[in-house]
Amino acid sequence: MCGRFVSTTGPQDLVTLFGVTRWDPADTLDPSWNAAPTDRIWAVLERVDHDSGELARQLRPLRWGLVPSWAKDPSVGARMINARAETVHEKPAFRKAFTTRRCLLPADGYYEWVAVPAAEGKKAYKQPYFVAPADSSLMAMAGLYEFWRDPTRPDDDPLAWLTSTTIITTQATDDAGRVHDRMPLAIDSRDFDAWLDPDLTDPAQLRPLLHTPADGHLTVRPVSIAVNSVRNNGPALLTEDPDAPPLT
């Protein structure tokens, strides 16, 4: 799975990197070295502009944890932070979004954990590892997004609508597979246009666009156990932990 990740690139740079044509400067997010489920995260998506009627590539903050339109309340989103690539086109919560509401989720890298058993008077704990492209490039994680209408709010309430997102994952490869058996998928820059195109709806054409991040050229290193608490944030979380047990 992908349960935490790092996202530190500012919106101005994301607008340039992803060819965004619409972004509201009032939408701001702080850099995060510990993005967690239910946090607001940056997403790149394409939708028809209400004013011009033209398709616009947008940069928007979405809540991580997809809430299907038919959900009774948004709490279900905490259980839908990932969508499995093997079944994303079949599952009721994801299949419609897979065909018409796809997005890109920028990330510097992501975290996974290895359970370390108790030994020599030390309690058992989970050692976090940071997984990132070896060339330090930005990952464009494959995502889906969905709209949910809060039935308890009036139509003119700006908080009546919640837009949420999920990360598509697959079987982990290379060094990443030594940490966890799942990993996020990414979209190659050459495929951004096709992936974001809401008129491309054939799953047979969409699935080949999903790639292993950085073509599998990833680095994995142990980092501070402070990552384990979602309350902690900041660049110090990426400090390498020299006392971490070696991966087997």
Image (cartoon, grey):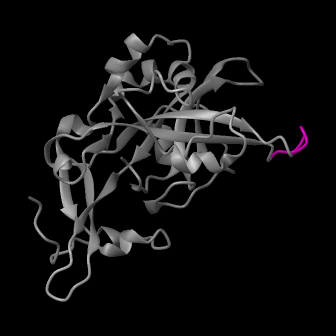
Q: Which region shows up in magenta? A: 153-158
Q: Is residue 189 left or right of residue 38?
A: left
In the image, 13 versus 160, the foreground residue is 160
- Place residue 240 in its image quadrant: bottom left
Which is nearer the eye, 6 or 181?
181
Q: How many marks?
A: 0
Left or right of residue 127, residue 84 in this image? right
Residue 107, horizontal then vertical, whole percent: 39, 48
- Tell me, yes or no, whether the highlighted magenta stretch contains residue 57: no
Q: Give whichever of 123, 136 is nearer the camera.
A: 123
Instruction: Indicate whether 159 appears above or below 46.
Output: below
Q: Where is residue 144 shown, x and y percent of the image?
A: 51, 32
Horizontally, is 141 left or right of 117 in the view? right
Residue at image coords 19%, 89%? 121
> Would residue 77 be seen by someone viewing this image from the given angle?
yes
Q: Which residue is painted at 69% across and 32% down in the image?
A: 70
Relative image position of residue 66 (x, y in whole percent): 57, 41
Name which residue lies at 41% across and 56% down: 4
Look at the image and tell me whether residue 134 can be seen: no
When the figure is inspected, residue 247 is found, relative to residue 203, above or below; the finding is below
Q: Is residue 45 left or right of residue 105?
A: right
Q: Please name the predominant secondary structure of the magenta segment in the image.
A: loop
Q: Residue at x 15, y 76 (%)?
A: 242
Quadrant occupied by the C terminus: bottom left
Q: Please tell me whether residue 14 is drawn above or below residue 70 in the rendered image.
A: below
Across and down, in percent, residue 152 comes to: 86, 46
Q: Is 157 one of the magenta-colored residues?
A: yes
